[in-house]
């Protein structure tokens, strides 16, 4: 994680795997929370990964647990940028890859060109 200046926080392992396939950006560290965290666990994440010193992006699902996690993360990481998927997809892992690629690219992350072909 030494070379990565950006941290992308996602909920699940499937989200992390899909996004990792799409990104063409070695400057991004994908941090998986494995679902909803408590305040104490979020504070540990902030400390363990030096999140105040990095560009942080929050990319959670649009369902209730995802929104709850986003709210908690935003309280701890007021400098974080939020990335959203369209509510019709509900979950990052169910969002078409070309939509994820476009969304990540809009957040200034490099994506593999082949994932933009559906646009």
Image: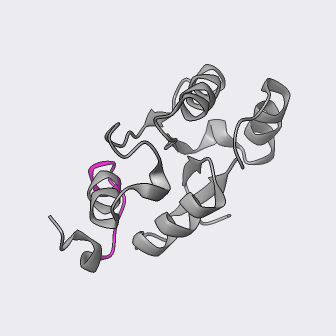
Among the 4 quarters of the image, the one containing residue 43 = top right
79 sits left or right of 86 in the view: right
At x 32%, y 53%, the residue is 108
Give the residues drawn in magenta, as a range: 104-112
Closer to us: 2 or 25: 25
Residue 6 in percent (x, y) is at: 52, 53
2 sits left or right of 16 in the view: right
At x 63%, y 53%, the residue is 12
Among the 4 quarters of the image, the one containing residue 96 = bottom left
Question: Against 105, is 70 above or below?
Answer: above
At x 69%, y 43%, the residue is 35
Q: Main secondary structure of the magenta part?
A: loop
Q: Could you tell me if residue 66 is visible in this image?
A: yes
Closer to us: 118 or 3: 118
Closer to us: 61 or 1: 61
At x 66%, y 41%, the residue is 51
Question: Against 49, is 66 above or below?
Answer: above
């Amino acid at each position: 994680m030494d070379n990565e200046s950006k941290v992308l926080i996602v909920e699940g392992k499937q989200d992390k795997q899909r996004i990792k396939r799409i990104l063409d950006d070695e400057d991004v560290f994908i941090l998986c929370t494995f679902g909803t965290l408590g305040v104490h666990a979020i504070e540990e994440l902030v400390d363990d990964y030096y999140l105040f010193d990095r560009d942080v992006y929050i990319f959670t699902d649009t369902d209730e647990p995802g929104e709850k996690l986003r709210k908690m993360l935003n309280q701890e990481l007021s400098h974080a940028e939020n990335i959203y998927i369209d509510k019709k997809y509900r979950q990052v892992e169910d969002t078409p890859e070309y939509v994820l690629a476009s969304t990540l690219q809009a957040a200034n992350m490099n994506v593999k060109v082949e994932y933009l072909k559906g646009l």
